[in-house]
Amino acid sequence: MDRTDVLIVAASGRALAASARRGGFNPLVADFFADQDTVAVAHACRRLDSGWRNGMQAREVLDALTALAAGRHPVGIVCGTGFEDRTALLAQIAERWPLIGNAPAVVARVKDPLALAALCRDCGIRHPDVSLQPADASGWLEKRRGGAGGRHVNAAPRVGRVEGTYFQRRVSGAPVSASILASGGRALVLGFSAQWASPTPQAPFRYGGAVTPAAITVETADTLAEMIRRLVVAVPLVGLNSVDFLVADDAVWLLEINPRPGATLDIFEPDGGSLFSLHVEACGGALPARVVPRRGAAASAIVHADRDVPSVPPFAWPDWTADRPHAGIALRAGEPLCTVTAAAATAERAKRLVLCRIEAVLGRMYERVA
């Protein structure tokens, strides 16, 4: 089978690479981890040594992509998590390879907190108040512009202009995210997931995991879908995106737009299909009438090391793990160890199973480290 070369760059590129492989592509991957299963599924892989704590570094990223593309003719590049606050770098990438995803100007617009608030206001969508400098910090959250994964969110500790941060009014509700495929001012909702945090004292809103389907009513789903329809008419989103909401009994709030394939790719991948292929096609202007959803419920979660691990021990990773680090890698407390997934008949069972699997992986690793 002839395969088409495609570049992928993301904080973690494994899920995109696996979906690309299922869709008939040769993935050429640059990411922060170069995990075992990323290397196995990628046609070629480069690790970005600056690491996930420092973010994407322009020279390192461009050098890695240039090396991956050498002697090949990739059809383009898909950029995953890691570029929300790096739109200048996105523009540099787009000068060298066709960008299969949202244009840098679109990313900049939806990740600008004031621009997003104005967009929601114009579309008649409820959105928490935002401010660069509120008079009183109580009742506000402090966020970093372009942040991802919840690590950048904290109760506002102070009031004052802090470079790179902004304030968002606290609102109540259950976190629900919509995974969408967009093209030509239209959007197809692939499904809704319920998300939960894996808090630490320093990062109380750190992303923990997600389960689909979310426990929302048909009426709420219709309300969210209508909000998304208004958004994609107003902003030319393309391909895979996600939209984060807070859902309460008396209100629905739009929190964020994530203008790229995200953390829930695993749980929305259709049986026998490829979201990566659908992303490429949507970015080219082709949006399917519908996508057959996967059967049952699915959950995924990030396993964070809760203590320093001087050297990850070698062991046989269960088949329900992904993003598996190489033996000998050192981890600091709080860093991601791997991802665990679960499928079940109901969302409640899938989430319960994935939480049990987190404990099982940590227990197995610490037994071998001790």
Image: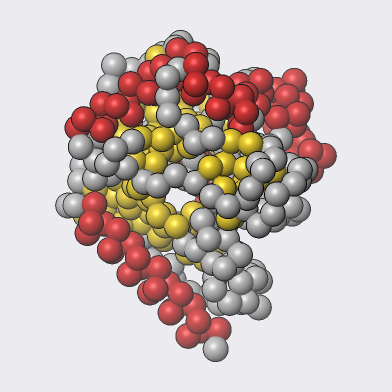
- Residue 109's spot in the image, x, y percent? 62, 24
Which residue is pictured at 29% across the width and 16% down the height?
289
Left or right of residue 136: residue 288: left
- Residue 296's spot in the image, x, y percent? 20, 46
- Residue 231's spot in the image, x, y percent? 45, 19
Which is more toward the observer, 124 or 257? 124
Left or right of residue 138: residue 194: left
Left or right of residue 111: residue 69: right
Q: Measured along the vertical axis of the image, is residue 235 above or below residue 329?
A: above
Quarter of the image with the C terminus is bottom right
Q: Exactly how many numbered labels are in the figure?
A: 0
- Residue 67's spot in the image, x, y percent? 75, 38
Q: For residue 325, which quarter of the picture?
A: bottom right
Which is more toward the observer, 122 or 192? 122
Q: Residue furthest front?
A: 135
Q: Residue furthest right?
A: 59
Q: Is there any visible trace of residue 353 in the rendered image?
A: yes
Q: Residue furthest bottom?
A: 370
Which residue is pictured at 65% across the width and 41% down the height?
134
Which residue is pictured at 75% across the width and 20% down the height?
95
Q: Is there any visible trace of residue 324 in the rendered image?
A: no
Quarter of the image with the N terminus is top left
Which residue is pictured at 69% across the width and 54% down the height?
158
Left or right of residue 290: residue 94: right
Q: Residue furthest left?
A: 345
Q: For residue 49, which quarter of the picture?
A: bottom right
Which is more toward the observer, 267 or 234? 234
